[in-house]
Amino acid sequence: EIVMTQSPATLSVSPGERATLSCRASQSVSSNLAWYQQKPGQAPRLLIYGASTRATGIPARFSGSGSGTEFTLTISSLQSEDFAVYYCQQYNNWPPSITFGQGTRLEIK
Amino acid sequence: QLQLQESGPGLVKPSETLSLTCTVSGGSISSSSYYWGWIRQPPGKGLEWIGSIYYSGSTYYNPSLKSRVTISVDTSKNQFSLKLSSVTAADTAVYYCARHMGSETPVDAFDIWGQGTMVTVSS
């Protein structure tokens, strides 16, 4: 099983500043990596797929990068609605064995 | 637009079988070439993929749950379902259904999610 490790567990950032979240895979997943945002009481929302492609309707302040085992989600200028938990997910294996990271909580500083 | 809605009992007794259904509206399971999945999230914890199914019935399961999981599809009702047997308190979670975004593959992200349904395992 591919293990996804996110860091940090909690990130405190002020509104308007940049946030950088990391995700590491225990083995290469190529670019088969997605990022999700989850707010309390809500389902996850797809932000990024293919490591760097924004999903439909996602603002340009969200960007993803990386390949292989190291990935980054960057939020360029934090808005109040961006404070949430973020998960990465790999979908590289065949047969499929999808795994998620444990999440990074982005909180207001 | 496409919407997914989970339904089923909110309380299940230990050792019994958890059964949930996901109803798809705004589109047809059988006419679209997507896989459909189940994901769960224990209270205060992260996400765990349970398994996925194609409208033809082809399934893939999380190896760690495979012995207890059955996912099926009913195209006449535009639904797919989850059964998890021999449940324990560790199976207490919010259960989500979702659509894989890629055509004809379960090896992809999930782009459309249901709102989730809380299932508690307790006597």
Image: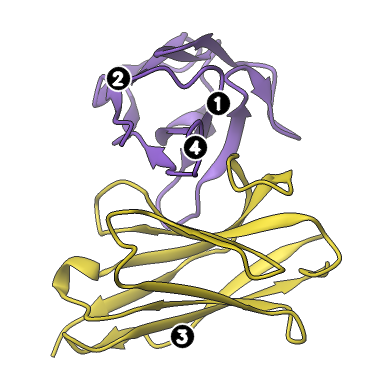
Chain colours: A purple, B yellow
Q: Is residue A54 above or below residue B110?
A: above
Q: Mark 2 highlights which residue? A: A12
Mark before the other along the chain sequence, 2 or 1: 2
- The answer for how far apart the CA atoms under marks 2 and 1 are is 28 Å
Asked whether disc 3 touches disc 4, contact meaning CB atoms under 8 Å apart, the reply is: no
Q: Disc 3 sits on a residue from what chain?
A: B
- The answer for how far apart the CA atoms under marks 3 and 1 are is 32 Å
Q: Residues within 10 Å of mark 1 (few under 14, many from 20)?
A: many
Q: Mark 1 highlights which residue? A: A32
Q: Mark 3 highlights which residue? A: B8
Q: Nearer the viewer, mark 4 or mark 1?
A: 1
* Tag 3 and tag 4 share a subunit: no
Q: Is residue A98 above or below residue B2?
A: above
Asked which secondary structure carries label 4, the reply is: strand
Instruction: Left or right? Give the position of A89 relative to A107.
Output: right
Q: Nearer the viewer, mark 2 or mark 1?
A: 1
**At x 30% / y 24%, what residue is drawn?**
A6
Asked which secondary structure carries label 3, the reply is: loop
Q: Position of residue A12 (x, y in %)?
A: 29, 19
Res. A57 image quadrant: top right
Going by the numbered disc 1, the residue's amino acid type is: Asn
Q: Position of residue A54 (x, y in %)?
A: 68, 25
Q: Nearer the viewer, mark 2 or mark 3?
A: 3
* Tag 2 and tag 1 share a subunit: yes
Q: Position of residue A73 (x, y in %)?
A: 49, 17
Mark before the other along the chain sequence, 4 or 2: 2
